Each structure stands twice: as C-alpha cells, then as structure tokens.
Image (spheres, helix red, strand yellow):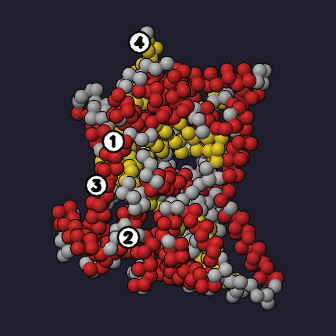
C-alpha cells in the first residue's frame, strides 16, 4: 500500500522512533546507487523492485557491520558471562524495517528513497519472511534476542538455517493447501556465511570402552556450516549474533569405492546428510518421532556446543588457566533450552567433558547442571517428547549410555528419599518402560538443569503442582515463572506507529526501552483529549485493515463495527471452535430479539492448520473468505479453514 501519512504524522513517528535526521540522506543515496551498481550489477534502466529492495537492505546492513564488529570486540575485551539461547525455531520474520528502527535510520532511508522516486513501504513488502518457526515458541526466541541486544547483554542465538520455513498457506475451495516456503530463493542479504568455522557432527557408529576412556567410532560425519545474522539493539550500538547451522556432506561422503557408478550414487546420496537442514517440521505442539527430527535436534546441539566451548577456551579468562578452565565454565556460560528440542545438549556436554576433556563424572555433572536452564512450553501429552530407545541406540549410542547413567544416579537419589515407593520411581524415571521403551526428554531437561520455567503464571503453577509435581517436591526452588513477553519495537513501533507516537507525546519516547514507564499513562485515564486521540488512532488502523480486505478479497465491511479478530494456529486449545460457537450464540440472540439495538461486530478468524492432519477425516466449514450478513446488524467474516 502506498504511503498516505501526513507530514505531521511522519514527524510524530520520527520523534518516537528516535530516528536520525536528514543529514545522512545524501550518503544513503550514494550508497544505494553504489550497491545497485557494484553489488547487484544493475542500473536504473533494468533494475527491478527486488533489486531496489536489496540495494536498500545492503546500505542498512553497511550501518550494522561496524557496530557488529565493535560489539564482539567489546565482549572479548570485557569477557562477560555469555548467554546462549538454543532453539530449533527462530521466527524472525522480516528484518529491514526492524533494523532501520533499531539503528535510528528509518526517516533518513524514507527520505532518501523518496528523493530517488521510490516508495519505501513497497520495498519493505518485497522482503521474504524468515519463517523459521511455527508460532509462539519461535517468536519468543526472536523477541528474546532483540530484548537481550537492547539490554546490552552478551547473548547469542543458535538454531538451524532451514532452507524451507513454515509452509505458505493457500485456501482453495475452502481447503488448506500447503506450499513450500522457499524463502532463500532470492538470497538473504542479512546473513554472513562463516565457512571458516565449519564443524563436524557425528551420527550412528558404536561405542568402545578402553583403558584410555570411551571412544565413539565408525560414526558418519555431517558438516555444520554457520551463517551469522546480526541482531541490533534499540539505539544502543549493540549488535549481537544469531548463528544458524546448515548441514553439508563432506567431500568424501560415501566415496570409499571409486568407480563411476558408485561415484554418481555417492554424490546423489549427499542429500541424505544435507536433508538435516532442509525443512522446518510444521508441527505446533505435536510430537512426531521421526529420525530426521532427532537428527535435527542433535545437529544443532552438537555444533552449538562445540562453538560455545571454542569461544570459551578462546576467552581471556580461560587462556589464563587452560588446565582448570572448566571449573568456572558455568560462571562464564549460561545455556537456555527453549523447550525439550535441544535437550540433547545435556548428554552432549557430559560427553564432551568426560570423553574429550577427561573430566570425571561428578565434576562434569556439576558443570552441566549449573550451565543449563529449561523453558517448558506446553503440558499437552501429545506434545511431550518421548524418543524410542531403539532409535536412540542406532543414532546416538554414546548419548544413550550417558542418559542411562544419569537416570541410574537420579533414581538412586529418589530411592533414598522415598524408600519402597516404586510408583514414584516409575513416574520420575527418564526411561519409560510401559510398552515401547522411551526416553522422556522433559524429565532429562528437569534433572539436568538448575532452573525450570513455564511461560505464564498459570502454566508455571500447573507444571509445579501437577505435571512435574514429583520433581518440584524435591527441588521447589528450581521451578520458576517467566511470563512470555514481546519486543515493543516490532510489536508497537512497527505494528502501530500511530499509537506509539501518541504515547510518546504524553510520556516521552524512552518507554520503548522501559515499558514500566507506561504506568505514567494512568494520569490520562480520564483525559478526554487523550481518549479521543486514542480512538482516532484505532479508527485509522481499522480503515487501513478494511481497505486491505476490500483490495485483497473484494469485501466491504462496516468500519464503525467492533473488529473481533482471532488469529492462531488451528488447534483445539486455541479455541477456534469455542469462538465459532460464540458467533452462533450472538446470531441466535439477534434472531430472538431482532428489534434490540445490537452493536455491529465484524469477526475475523485466521490461522494455519498443522500439515500432518489426515485430510480424509476433515471437512471444510467455510471458504477462505466469506461475508455472511446476519439480519443487517452484524457481518461475520470468516478467514478460516477448519480441519479437524
């Protein structure tokens, strides 16, 4: 959509966002033309809109690079404790506008593009989403990285560079159709490949116990190539790093028998290794025990821990006492496990400390437990990871041995606290033996971490008092609550700039870095002028949404009605069915009292269904978008495909 904001509105937005003035506009224009010419090898006669987007992205990235390098130099000089956030999902989304705001460049870039005859909003729309997550878990990870950079913390995100992110959803004849999210097809201007830090990750093989220690032999190797993405803080010159790993087969992959036929097949078989980073599993709160998924989980863990230990050993602190440096590992390294997906980090660190660094069990376990903390995201039984022992034994034989040893020592402790209570032992074991033998990954995370948190007060209470009560009875202090938060930069400045500017007029713009300052708005609760201004901002936003719906779907809606919006993944506990029932209730109330003065309401429901659903059991209840007039008082807008 083309810009329609007035000069005064733009001035307000510039004030709230703390953006730079116009003194850099000429430099930005020069940089834009330079990148168009030298980076993209185009001129204005043949350049496409995507070329213009890429040129703009590169000049913004230029302003990141110096800050990025200086931030990492500062961390090396000061050697602070580093935070490592391990997650199989990072729902980053688009980067350009968020980066311009955090660097204070948006107004200058806006003006530079305007002088070049380009609309910056059109360029922003060209960027592909980095949809490397399914929902809340992946978006929380992205928000944490933004917040930690804004707080100036030495933080790093570790994940997988999926070639295909969360599927694109199309609605055809009332049915959901999934399309691959080839988000890298045009390249990614924000990432920097780091092949010099490539690391080996091993699978399969067998374990030997020798007089010199335990050896994991005959394993297959997959290379992990890191790609770094800068994570800028808000107007503080801090730029942290998100490192995503891409799987690559080594050059000698299966090339043991060199003849033409075997050579061709060996090259083709490289895909088996490189599939590890091919696609994000599109499951939201549902566990699928697939071998590829377990490979993904170990792949990110093994590569990340090697990288973390390399950085730890290279620090000034460790180089002073290399021999005993691991004694203080947990004082310098904090690793947060985002759900159970990276749970294998616990036995992996134990393996590294014992088998490679030759540290005894007791010391290695103390280091491991003091290093890790675990965030639980769900209590749904179908979502909790329980991996079959047979698969573990085939894929990660050494890790299974370590998990068995952790479990044996854990159960010995429980037995000493509750002698004769076999049911408690069964409930608390890391190894479940009812039916197929499985490893309970949540139990592994709890036993191997020094802190466990839920993501909402009621969630954390259920974890502590019901789901993991046996564990919290023994270590109640370990169980905490950390209510989910979001970054106000993306979810206020970007999503609702009018409201952000209005708040800044009343309490100043610093609240964007300190949301506690919003309490100052209590003074305006009964201020008629402020309430009127808030209402105006809301109405302007409703007009924009209504215009978008009319443009995309040809549907006109009542802009004076209540907009009732429900956008979530399609799932029982997300309450879409409850919402549909409520809509029916409202409709029946109108039918019962047709002369009553009901407030008009427009209901919008949208969301993706998990792609693993059995379509044969599904029935569509509505086309992708339909407007059903209910007596002339209410319109029901369904942007939903219900598959359950």
Q: In which quadrant will I find the C terminus?
A: bottom right
Q: Nearer the viewer, residue 31 or 432?
A: 31
Frontmost of labels 3 and 1 is 1
User: SS of the residue at dot 3?
Assistant: helix
- Residue identified by numbered label 3: 66
Residue for point 23% across, 70% down:
27
Q: State the image coordinates of residue 19 (x, y, percent, origin top left).
A: 38, 70
Residue 588 numbered mark, or none: none
Q: In which quadrant will I find the N terminus?
A: bottom left
- Left or right: where 564 falls relative to 213: right
User: SS of the residue at dot 2?
Assistant: loop
User: SS of the residue at dot 1?
Assistant: helix
- Residue identified by numbered label 2: 19
The answer to whether residue 266 is seen in the rendering is no
Q: Is residue 365 above or below residue 137?
A: above
Residue for point 54% across, 26% down:
366
Mark 2 or mark 4: whose residue is earlier in sequence:
2
Q: Nearer the viewer, residue 86 or 168?
A: 86
- Residue identified by numbered label 4: 212
- Residue identified by numbered label 1: 77
Inter-mark Cα distance, 4 to 1: 38 Å
Q: State the image coordinates of residue 575 (x, y, percent, origin top left).
A: 68, 61
Q: State the image coordinates of residue 70 (x, y, percent, origin top left).
A: 31, 50
- Left or right: where 593 falls relative to 200: right
């Amino acid at each position: 959509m083309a810009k329609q904001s007035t000069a005064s509105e733009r001035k307000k937005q510039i004030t709230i966002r703390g953006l730079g003035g116009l003194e850099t506009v000429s430099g930005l224009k020069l940089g834009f033309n330079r990148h168009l010419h030298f980076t993209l090898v185009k001129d204005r006669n043949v350049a496409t809109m995507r070329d213009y987007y890429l040129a703009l992205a590169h000049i913004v990235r230029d302003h990141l690079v110096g800050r990025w390098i200086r931030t990492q130099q500062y961390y090396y000089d000061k050697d602070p404790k580093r935070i490592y956030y391990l997650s199989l999902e990072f729902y980053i989304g688009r980067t350009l506008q968020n980066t311009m705001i955090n660097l204070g460049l948006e107004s200058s870039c806006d003006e530079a593009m305007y002088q070049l005859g380009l609309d910056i909003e059109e360029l922003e729309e060209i960027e592909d989403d980095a949809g490397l997550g399914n929902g809340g878990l992946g978006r929380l990870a992205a928000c944490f990285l933004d917040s930690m950079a804004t707080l100036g913390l030495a933080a790093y995100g570790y994940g997988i560079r999926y070639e295909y992110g969360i599927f694109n959803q199309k609605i055809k004849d009332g049915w959901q159709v999934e399309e691959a999210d080839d988000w890298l097809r045009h390249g990614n201007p924000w990432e920097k490949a780091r092949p010099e830090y490539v690391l080996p990750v091993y699978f399969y093989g067998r374990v030997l116990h020798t007089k010199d220690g335990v050896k994991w032999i005959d394993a297959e190797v997959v290379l992990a190539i890191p790609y770094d993405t800068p994570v800028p803080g808000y107007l503080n010159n801090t730029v942290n790093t998100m490192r995503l790993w891409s799987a690559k087969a080594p050059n000698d992959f299966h090339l043991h028998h060199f003849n033409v036929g075997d050579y061709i097949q060996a090259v083709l078989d490289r895909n088996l290794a490189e599939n590890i980073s091919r696609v994000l599993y599109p499951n939201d709160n549902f566990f699928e025990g697939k071998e590829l998924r377990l490979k993904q989980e170990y792949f990110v863990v093994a590569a990340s821990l090697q990288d973390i230990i390399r950085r730890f050993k290279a620090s000034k602190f460790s180089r002073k006492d290399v021999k005993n440096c691991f004694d203080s590992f947990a004082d310098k390294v904090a690793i947060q496990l985002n759900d159970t997906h990276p749970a294998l980090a616990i036995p992996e660190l134990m393996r590294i400390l014992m088998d490679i660094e030759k540290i005894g069990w007791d010391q290695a376990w103390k280091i491991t437990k003091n290093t890790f903390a675990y965030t639980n995201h769900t209590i749904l039984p179908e979502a909790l990871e329980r991996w079959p022992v047979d698969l573990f034994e085939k894929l990660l034989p050494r890790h299974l041995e370590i998990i068995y040893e952790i479990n044996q020592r854990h159960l010995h402790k429980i037995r000493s606290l509750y002698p004769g209570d076999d049911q408690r032992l069964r409930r608390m074991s890391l190894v479940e033996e009812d039916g197929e033998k499985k490893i309970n990954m949540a139990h592994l995370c709890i036993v191997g971490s020094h802190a466990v948190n839920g993501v909402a007060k009621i969630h954390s209470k259920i974890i502590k008092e019901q789901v993991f009560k046996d564990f919290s009875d023994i270590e109640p202090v370990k169980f905490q609550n950390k209510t989910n938060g979001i970054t106000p930069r993306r979810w206020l400045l970007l999503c609702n700039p009018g409201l952000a500017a209005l708040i800044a007029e009343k309490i100043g713009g610093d609240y964007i870095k300190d949301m506690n300052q919003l309490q100052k708005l209590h003074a305006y609760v009964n201020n008629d002028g402020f309430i009127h201004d808030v209402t105006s901002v809301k109405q302007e936003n409703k007009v924009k949404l209504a215009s978008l719906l009319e443009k995309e779907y040809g549907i006109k809606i009542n802009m004076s009605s209540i907009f009732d919006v429900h956008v979530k993944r399609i799932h029982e506990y997300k309450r879409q069915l409850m919402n549909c029932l409520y809509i029916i209730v409202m409709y029946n109330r109108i039918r019962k009292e047709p002369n009553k003065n009901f407030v008009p309401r427009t209901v919008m429901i949208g969301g993706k269904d998990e792609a693993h659903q059995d379509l044969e059991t599904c029935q569509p209840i509505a086309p992708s978008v339909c407007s059903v007039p209910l007596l002339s008082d209410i319109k029901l807008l369904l942007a939903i495909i219900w598959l359950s």
